[in-house]
Image (cartoon, coloured by chain):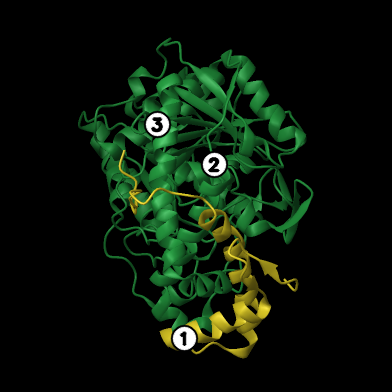
Amino acid sequence: MAGDDLRTIPLHRLSATTIAGAVAAQRISATEVLEDHIDRIRALDPALNCFTDLCLDRARAAAATVDARIATGECPKLAGVPVAVKNLFNVSGLKTRAGSKILRDQPPATHDAEALARLVKAGAVPLGTLNMDEFAYGFVTENTHDGPTRNPHDPTRSAGGSSGGSAAAVAAGLAPLTLGSDTNGSIRVPAALCGVFGLKPTYGALPREGSFPFVDSLDHVGPFARSAADLAIAFDVMHGGAPVAPAIADAVPYRVAVLDGWFSHGATEAALEAVDRVARALGADTRTELPEARRARAAAFCITAAEGGTLHLDRLRTRAGDFDPATRPRLLAGALLPAAIVQQAQRFRAWFAAEASRLFERHDALLAPATPCPALVLGQATMEIAGETVPVRPHLGLYTQPISFIGLPVVVVPVHGVGPLPLGVQVIAAPGCESVALAIAHRLERDGICAAPVVGPS
Amino acid sequence: MTTPRADQSGVIRSDVTLAALVDAGAALLGIPLAAAHRGEVVVALAMIMAQADLILDFPLPDVAEAAPRFCP
């Protein structure tokens, strides 16, 4: 981007990659970028409620440090990129709430979570922490203690969850890069409903140290951004392995299929149209089935309740009344679940993973809707899935749960124009193949099929 | 949930069964369940059990091993 454009386009509309390049080239300073984002947060966040805590003194010091590093000839990959994290990541000096009232009794964190520390080391500037469902158990970010995060596309609607603050902040231009966590869909659901890109990497690919857990065997951390290239660079910085960013523009022909069966069960026409639009653009005319995906979702559902309930058992014994009423009953019920159910779910997991790996012998990537429907109105308690009325909070992840159950990497690509609100499509790859999902997302972006424009006033 | 349902083994599961599990489980685990919370826990347990049925119904060979963590 030319230097002149940097003066005519508001800095909060730039991608992380563009900001880093411009700061590294000293066309703009990290401090200028930060102050523009602070102005944006002050203007929009009182209505959206993305942030729960800001660390602006630290941010200003960090931006000044980045500018000083640039002046000495350093060229950090994320120079001056503002970043914010779901409030289950430790941020030095802030209390790690995990969306709860209970954890507010804890002292502030003394160190950054490892994923954030790696971003900051690469020049990112930490802004603060973001709203979420309590203890990450939900898909709506309607938090009793901190209030709901509103969807920037329609403030009467949910941002999705549980990383709703992370997705909405990126959509509204409050930060070009945020971190969230995904146990059953908590990156993919809000990315889809807020119309931004989100990456749930392979299980274990990114460090979870310093993030508050939910379900050890299912927890992933990952980034949100407004472009596939931004996801790729953030992934590379946090992963530290062979970089994927340089290869996402390669013209590799991928074998892509659309997942059928469970992944169209109960989906709205708009959700299916979003998948069709992506499939057509990729020339993906094959449909395939991931066998028993419904049971995989059920197994993840049971494991989540049981592991989550066990994790919080002491707090349920002593402070049940301080839990969010939306979270408490599911954690309590999970703690009481007979062991045979959990063990059978774990045995089923091995069977299901083997079935999935057979699919990847024939396909490089699989497509599925991220959610059955667009963002729902705040406070909506039930929705209809295939003619059945079901509660919203546990059911928005129908199509995401079977995939995280077996740890596969997924990029959610945002599709606009299939209705008044955005929707997301999961681009699912084989374990360790984030580069494939990111390359496909990049291709869709380049071809104008997917985009994540900043929402709201300039 | 008010309608008793039979699982595959013919056992009738009802609100009464679930409430009994909630009461016994809470007592065993030392959770002092408030009366105001009991009903919502029974509803949540019913929802989880409906999902559990899908797993318990699925035939797995005796040699099927558990995968408590995903290993690529």
Could you say which is closer to the camera, residue A203 or residue A380?
A203
**Tag 3's secondary structure?**
helix
Q: Amino acid at mark 2?
A: Glu
Palette colour of chain A: green
User: In the image, what residue occupies the spot 42% across and 84% down?
Assistant: B29
Distance Cα–Cα, label 1 vs label 2: 35 Å
Q: Which mark is residue A292?
A: 2
Q: Amino acid at mark 1?
A: Ile
Question: Which residue, given by chain and number where applicable, does mark 1 sit on?
Answer: B31
Place of residue A110 in the rendered image (x, y in percent of width and height, measured from the top left)? 27, 65
Precedes in sequence: disc 3 or disc 2: 2
Q: Against A391, is A434 above or below? A: above
Question: Which residue, given by chain and number where applicable, does mark 3 sit on?
Answer: A357
Letter of the chain that mark 2 sits on in the rendering: A
Q: Amino acid at mark 3?
A: Ser
Q: Nearer the viewer, mark 1 or mark 2?
A: 2
User: Do the residues under discs 3 and 2 have CB atoms within 8 angstroms?
Assistant: no
The image quadrant where one finds the C terminus of chain A is top right
Q: Is residue A235 left or right of residue A50?
A: left
Palette colour of chain B: yellow
